[in-house]
Image: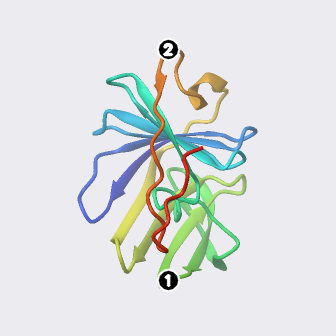
Amino acid sequence: MLYRAQGPRDQEPVSIRVHVSGGRIRVEPTSLPGYLIVDRDAGRVLVVMRQPHVYFETPTQSELVRDFLPSERMHFTRKGSERVAGLSCTVWDVQAPEGRSGQVCVTADGIVLRGQGQDPQYGRGSVEAVSVTYGPQSPGLFQPPAGYLRMNIPRLPTASGGARPAR
């Protein structure tokens, strides 16, 4: 899928691949030197940097992806249906904690075709599918590339001042 994204700073197109049976998403911003692999089932996000061939892991509870995936803390209200990128989708209003809100249009098989939202801390943002292609994908697209070095990043201190240990 190719998405057009708009945020507090304008962004270039973003390619997103979804491995439905594996519960993984690969996000590839065209302007950045790497990509993200979100593995919800394993509770982790891998940040892969093409140069210098390294990757590191962050838990899905991190701010990096806190609002990227639906959670039980969000409330969805059905609003109707539309067509985006030639596909039918259901429109949902979304209310989330801490004053975040938005609207998404999701296909029957769970693909987000359009989303827009606002966050008191990060501002407004939106994504819209430009094209969607269904087909088999190599499971290797959702794993760190062979030969890449895993870097261990120490945890940042928590709000209580204590440091969280690295895994």
Residue 41 can be seen, yes or no: yes
Q: Earlier in the sequence, mark 2 or mark 1?
A: 1
Residue 138 can be seen, yes or no: no
Name the residue: 76% across, 39% down. 21
Instruction: State which quadrant residue 18 falls in.
Output: top right
The extreme top residue here reads 147
Instruction: State which quadrant residue 141 falls in.
Output: top right
Name the residue: 36% across, 66% down. 125
Of residue 91 and residue 97, the one placed in the foreground of this image is 97
The extreme left residue here reads 9
Identity, as a three-letter code, of the amino acid under mark 2? Gly
Mark number, residue 147: 2
Answer above or below: position of 97 versus 46.
Answer: below
Q: Position of residue 46 (x, y in %)?
A: 52, 39
Left or right: residue 143 versus residue 116 is right
Name the residue: 63% across, 76% down. 74
Residue where numbered disc 1 is placed: 98
Mark number, residue 71: none
Name the residue: 54% across, 16% down. 146
Circle 2 packing at 10 Å, graded few (<14), some (14-19), many (20+), is few
